[in-house]
Image (spheres, grey):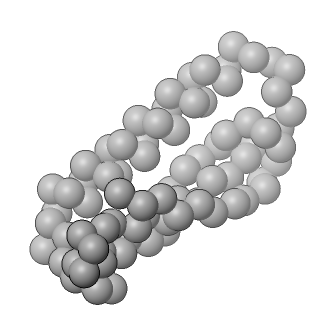
């Protein structure tokens, strides 16, 4: 089990989340590859999980993902499941 703030998350659940992020990134990168007009600042280079938090009181999982564009711009988003 991975220990995270607020609770535990199983290795398989963490792996499922990692696969979902990777698959989504690959889909977006693939879709963008045929669109040469997308500027580097808007073209996805990477998506990395920077945090997983479990809140057992309301059975929520919070996943923070850092997105990086081809121009090096970075932004983070926290998703709740």
**Quadrant location of the C terminus in the rendered image:** bottom left
| Percent position of residue 65, x then y | 52, 59
Is residue 49 visible to the viewer in this orientation of the structure?
Answer: no
Specify the farthest residue to the front: 58
Q: Is residue 1 above or below residue 32?
A: below
Of residues 48 and 55, the one nearer the viewer is 55
Q: Residue at x 49, y 32 (%)?
A: 26
| Percent position of residue 77, x then y | 59, 60
| Percent position of residue 12, x then y | 15, 56
Q: Is residue 58 above or below residue 12?
A: below
Please state the total of marks drawn on the protein image.
0
Specify the farthest residue to the bottom: 6
Residue 6 sits in quarter: bottom left
Of residues 17 and 61, the one nearer the viewer is 61
Say whether residue 65 is left or right of residue 60: right
Q: Residue at x 20, y 57 (%)?
A: 13
Say whether residue 63 is left or right of residue 40: left
Say whether residue 54 is left or right of residue 70: left
Is residue 65 visible to the viewer in this orientation of the structure?
Answer: yes
Say whether residue 41 is left or right of residue 66: right
């Amino acid at each position: 089990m991975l220990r995270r703030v607020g609770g535990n998350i199983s290795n398989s659940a963490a792996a499922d989340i990692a696969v979902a992020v990777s698959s989504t990134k690959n889909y977006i990168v693939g879709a963008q590859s045929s669109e040469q007009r997308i500027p580097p600042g808007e073209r996805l280079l990477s998506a990395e999980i920077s945090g997983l938090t479990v809140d057992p009181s309301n059975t929520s999982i919070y996943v923070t993902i850092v997105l990086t564009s081809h121009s090096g711009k970075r932004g983070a988003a926290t998703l709740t499941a």
